[in-house]
Amino acid sequence: MQRFVSFLVELGGVKGTLAVGLAWAAHLDLFSSFSLDVRDVGIAVGLAIPILIVDAVLMAPDWSEAPHMAALNSAMQAAPGDPAAGGVSVPAAAGAAAAPQDAGAWAQFVEAAAMFQTIKVRANPAMGLSAVQESALIIVGHIADEMLARGVILGWGSLWVRDRLYEADSLTFWSDQTNEQAAPWFALAVILAIEIARKWKSLSRSMTVQAAVVGKDKITGRTKVTPIDKDRLDDVASQPAVARTLNSTSPERLAAIQAQVSAARQRAASVAQMDSLRSLLDWMAYGSAFILGHGNLCGPVVASTLTDALFSSYQRKGAARLAARQRARVESATAELRAKMNAVAGLGQDAAAPGVVEDGSKSETGQPGEQETKDDS
């Protein structure tokens, strides 16, 4: 219950308060922007159909069980890495890195979709809550989100663009009504351009590999990862310990590590592209619904709540699949361990059992000298 209340305050209270404060500063009336109009809601849901399709394609199937992913996982598990070489296996790394290039665009999509699905399933902060509690968080959260994103940002941006259009001498041939109608679309285009630039910067960052040094903290003794600047790469590579490691590593292993890093970078970029696509679709769909609804926030709230509720159901289904696979791995490992223990116990019983005499007959057990006593009698 405490987590539910904290999420409720974070998603609804903080964003909602911020939206109301900014709206008051911009002289906007957010509460009058809510009007339950069936037409506006229908337009918003219709514009959200591309988002529903993208979510269904990326989240509904179990991409980790696709034939390509099964073959890739088998190849990765077939040749475990050498601990002395950092746990990197040359055949497995080379196969994992070459798979996207050899198998084509479909293989790249399957790997990226499986990675995207796993990230989104594990990133659900409300996974430990009940479905009813998560539904309440979705509703409250999207009311606050739409008030801030569409009501304040797009609403104030539309007013600002409208004033600039009135002031522009080159657009004096436009009527006042045209300015009123065009201003929101100009504002939405500017917001989309900013979002694209921001996502492109994030995508470029995801394609960058950061070098780092792994060592122990001198005070705590814990493992510490220290990033290395590009200017210090030559200095670090010239250190005796690093130089010995590089010289002792075979060229094949270095090539496999480089290929593995390249493949991981490519998958991370594909996941970032999928995430960026969904974010842009959100702004296009809900922003257009807000404009076509003449500033009515009810349509975007209903549509975004619907899409997020379905996305949450995909996350919960994916979490159940992950838990089932985890249980299967634990049961398999337990069965294997039990079989080994039984085999060891069987060997112990065989070692403690009576021996076999040379003529094939079993020796008699008993007190020492018992067989001789019987023969004498």
Image (spheres, rainbow, N blue to C red):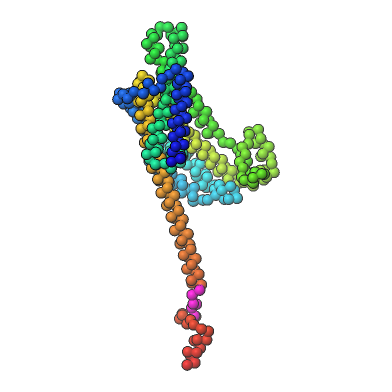
The residue located at (58%, 45%) in the rendering is: 253
Q: Is residue 220 left or right of residue 347?
A: right
**Which of 75 and 40 lies nearest the eye of the viewer?**
40
| Residue 61 x/y as whole percent | 38, 41
The residue located at (47%, 93%) in the rendering is: 377
Quarter of the rendering containing residue 223: top right
- Classify 90 as above or below 354: above
The residue located at (47%, 19%) in the rendering is: 25
In magenta segment, residue 132: no
**Which of 212 and 40 lies nearest the eye of the viewer?**
40
Q: Is residue 288 left or right of residue 18?
A: left
- Classify 371 as above or below 81: below
Q: Is residue 207 left or right of residue 141?
A: right
- Classify 44 as above or below 60: above
Quarter of the rendering containing residue 278: top left
Report whether residue 187 is seen.
Answer: no
| Residue 294 x/y as whole percent | 36, 19
Which residue is situated farthest in the bottom direction here? Answer: 377
The residue located at (42%, 28%) in the rendering is: 144
| Residue 217 x/y as whole percent | 65, 43
Report whether residue 155 is seen.
Answer: yes
**Which of 292 and 209 lies nearest the eye of the viewer?**
292
Query: Which segment is the magenta one?
Result: 352-357
Quarter of the rendering containing residue 179: top left
**Which of 225 and 113 lies nearest the eye of the viewer?**
225
| Residue 268 x/y as whole percent | 50, 36
In the picture, the quarter occupied by the N terminus is top left
Magenta stretch, overall SS: loop
